């Protein structure tokens, strides 16, 4: 055999090394993906996991005892599956936990009927069972409130206007139509180059505009946040925004007058009530810097606050308007836990040759209090847990470390993910929150070792593609990675940003962070923040598909030679290196 001269041999070695280094990010292990599909479809545990998170431990209000119990169960399960470095990542301070212990409400006179209602989170309770008259606060302005001066003490007060309840001629559940997906696929590059998606508008300035300009600005704002919204949805949202101006003033007035409780008409119908947290009533003159959240350790005692089913609320208003004297009986027992830090649940599948680099998947773990937190966001948490279970059960060895993060405090402002990103990857000493855009970033060493984050938080709906957050460099990669799932309905890529969830914390500091496009199903119409956000509303086939795609994307990203590409910053933030992590 002829011996090669040294220069030729070296050249061949260099070329071979270059060829290995240039394996494209679009490449993936088809055999591994096929195994992932088989495991996720034929031996799935995602619904069993979801049942534990919802039926047994739901709801999971941030810092509540139920949240901690769910986290303990989840940590034990992750350890059972063989994940490493399972721990709680503390952040804060957050504030008090809250648990509903007992609640019932009935109209007792002149006609008796049980009232469909639900207390708002962090509402105070009542001292035993209270029976009192019901008053409708029929006020459309601050001046109207004065006619109720001295008439509300010891009364249940209906504080909102009655709601129109229309028949549902369109289905409440829907899949994304091909036409909608095509529109998303053809969306242009988001404008502005802002980190972290949308900036919150100056609502105070908008509301001070003359009516014509105000309505035009509100309509433009709604269209930005709700592209393609129907006219009736735009009108309803504008009405809600306008009503929200007077709401805090009414609440402060009712509390100062000594009412027993403030009752409002919850969004939803047919027994569904969309209900979130109570409010701390402040005089309108109180500056924002002097206001605290209802869960804050320093929050003052507030009036009990309850949302009623629209049909029952409306009936009571109509009865009062016809001169009927209403009496209601209510029992409301709650328990507050002491103020403490919040925490996230973290775990890892250790990498091999690139173990110091990280791929992350995640979802928020907390929920609201009325349902059991099934579609928001038990599904996302169960999908991420199922993804790592699949990878572990197959014995796949990722090159990069795959880390799962189940975030707390998302419903109160993405607290868990933002604080995690601030602690480990980048922070803004000028006061801007990571994920909110803006601010001088202090880049930490782990920022360079980070590859990509994938998030699941839009309900039960199956994955239809990916929001690319303006990152055009991701298109070819995602197109290739979605190929095995085209027949499952996942094929759409859009440059659109999407907001409101935890990928923003990463995207906001220049790290690749993505949320999947999902079918809405009943998310906005039935389950999102409602008392019907329960296990039965979850579609098993959808969450199986989502779990498989999450597992495949995490594994693909963990196996590439290069880290996931980051989008260019049109407006580069000032950066300075931190001394350590």
Image (spheres, rainbow, N blue to C red):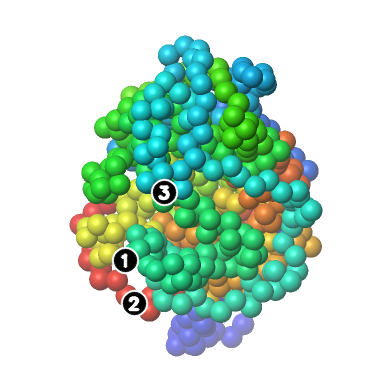
Q: Position of residue 146 (x, y in %)?
A: 36, 39
Placement of 84 over or under 324, stated as above or below: below
SS category of the residue bearing label 1:
loop
> Alpha-carbon neighbours of circle 3 within 10 Å: few (<14), some, or many (≥20)?
few
Q: Earlier in the sequence, mark 3 or mark 1?
A: 3
| Whether label 3 touches label 1, CB < 8 Å | no
Q: Which residue is mark 1?
A: 438
Q: Is residue 319 visible?
A: yes
Q: Residue lying farthest top?
A: 128
Q: Position of residue 116 (x, y in %)?
A: 63, 28
Q: Disc 2 and disc 1: Cα gap in Å? A: 10 Å
Q: Is residue 572 left or right of residue 577?
A: right
Query: What residue is drawn where x is 64% and y is 61%?
Result: 232
Identify the mark at residue 571; answer none if there is no mark: 2
Query: What residue is drawn where x is 60% and y is 76%?
Result: 187
Placement of 284 over or under 442, stated as above or below: above
Q: Disc 2 and disc 3: Cα gap in Å? A: 44 Å
Q: Earlier in the sequence, mark 2 or mark 1?
A: 1
| Whether label 2 touches label 1, CB < 8 Å | no
Q: Disc 3 and disc 1: Cα gap in Å? A: 37 Å
Q: Which residue is mark 3?
A: 141
Q: Quadrant of residue 123?
A: top left
SS category of the residue bearing label 3:
loop
Tell which tag, 3 or 1, sits nearer the viewer: 3
> Alpha-carbon neighbours of circle 2 within 10 Å: few (<14), some, or many (≥20)?
few
């Amino acid at each position: 055999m002829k011996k090669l001269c040294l220069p030729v041999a070296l050249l061949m070695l260099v070329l071979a090394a270059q060829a290995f280094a240039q394996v494209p990010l679009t490449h993936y292990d088809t055999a591994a993906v096929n195994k992932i599909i088989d495991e996720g479809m034929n031996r799935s545990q995602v619904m069993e996991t979801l049942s534990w998170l919802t039926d047994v431990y739901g709801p999971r209000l941030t810092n509540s005892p139920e949240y901690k119990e769910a986290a303990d169960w989840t940590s034990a399960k992750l350890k059972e599956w063989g994940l490493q470095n399972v721990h709680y990542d503390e952040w804060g301070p957050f504030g008090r936990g809250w648990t509903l212990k007992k609640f019932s409400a009935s109209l007792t006179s002149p006609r008796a009927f049980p009232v469909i209602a639900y207390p708002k989170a962090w509402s105070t309770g009542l001292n035993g069972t209270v029976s009192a008259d019901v008053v409708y606060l029929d006020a459309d302005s601050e001046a109207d409130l004065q006619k109720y001066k001295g008439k509300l003490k010891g009364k249940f007060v209906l504080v909102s206007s009655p709601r129109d309840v229309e028949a549902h001629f369109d289905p409440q559940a829907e899949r994304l139509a091909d036409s909608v997906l095509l529109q998303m696929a053809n969306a242009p590059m988001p404008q502005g180059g802002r980190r972290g998606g949308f900036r919150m508008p100056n609502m105070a300035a908008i509301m001070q505009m003359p009516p014509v300009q105000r309505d035009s600005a509100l309509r433009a704002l709604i269209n930005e946040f709700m592209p393609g919204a129907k006219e009736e949805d735009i009108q309803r949202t504008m009405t809600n925004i306008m009503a929200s101006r007077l709401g805090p003033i009414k609440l402060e007035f009712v509390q100062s007058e000594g009412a027993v409780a403030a009752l409002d008409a919850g969004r939803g119908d047919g027994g569904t009530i969309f209900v979130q947290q109570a409010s701390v009533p402040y005089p309108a003159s109180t500056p924002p810097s002097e206001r605290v959240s209802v869960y804050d350790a320093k929050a003052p005692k507030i009036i009990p606050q309850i949302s009623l089913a629209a049909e029952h609320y409306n009936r009571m208003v109509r009865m009062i308007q016809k001169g009927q004297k209403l009496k209601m009986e209510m029992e409301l027992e709650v328990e507050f836990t002491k103020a403490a830090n919040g925490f996230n649940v973290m775990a890892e599948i250790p990498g091999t040759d690139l173990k110091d680099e990280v791929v992350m998947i995640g979802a928020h773990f907390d929920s609201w209090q009325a349902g059991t937190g099934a579609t928001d966001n038990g599904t996302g948490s169960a999908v991420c847990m199922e993804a790592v279970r699949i990878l572990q059960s197959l014995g796949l060895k990722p090159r990069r470390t795959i880390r799962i993060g189940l975030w707390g405090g998302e419903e109160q402002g993405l607290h868990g993910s933002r604080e995690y990103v601030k602690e480990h990857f980048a922070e803004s000493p000028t006061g801007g929150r990571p994920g909110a855009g803006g601010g001088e970033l202090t880049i930490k060493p782990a920022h360079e070792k980070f590859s990509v984050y994938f998030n699941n938080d839009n309900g039960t709906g199956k994955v239809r593609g990916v929001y690319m957050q303006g990152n055009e460099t991701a298109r070819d990669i995602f197109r290739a990675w979605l190929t095995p799932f085209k027949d499952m309905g996942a094929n759409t890529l859009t440059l659109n940003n999407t907001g409101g969830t935890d990928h923003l914390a990463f995207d906001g500091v220049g790290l690749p962070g993505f949320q999947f496009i999902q079918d809405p199903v009943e998310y906005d119409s039935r389950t999102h923040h409602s008392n019907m956000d329960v296990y039965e509303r979850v579609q098993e086939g959808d969450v199986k598909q989502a779990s498989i795609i999450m597992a495949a994307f995490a594994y693909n990203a963990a196996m590439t030679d290069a880290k996931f590409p980051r989008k260019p910053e049109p407006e580069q933030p000032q950066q300075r290196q931190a001394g350590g992590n």
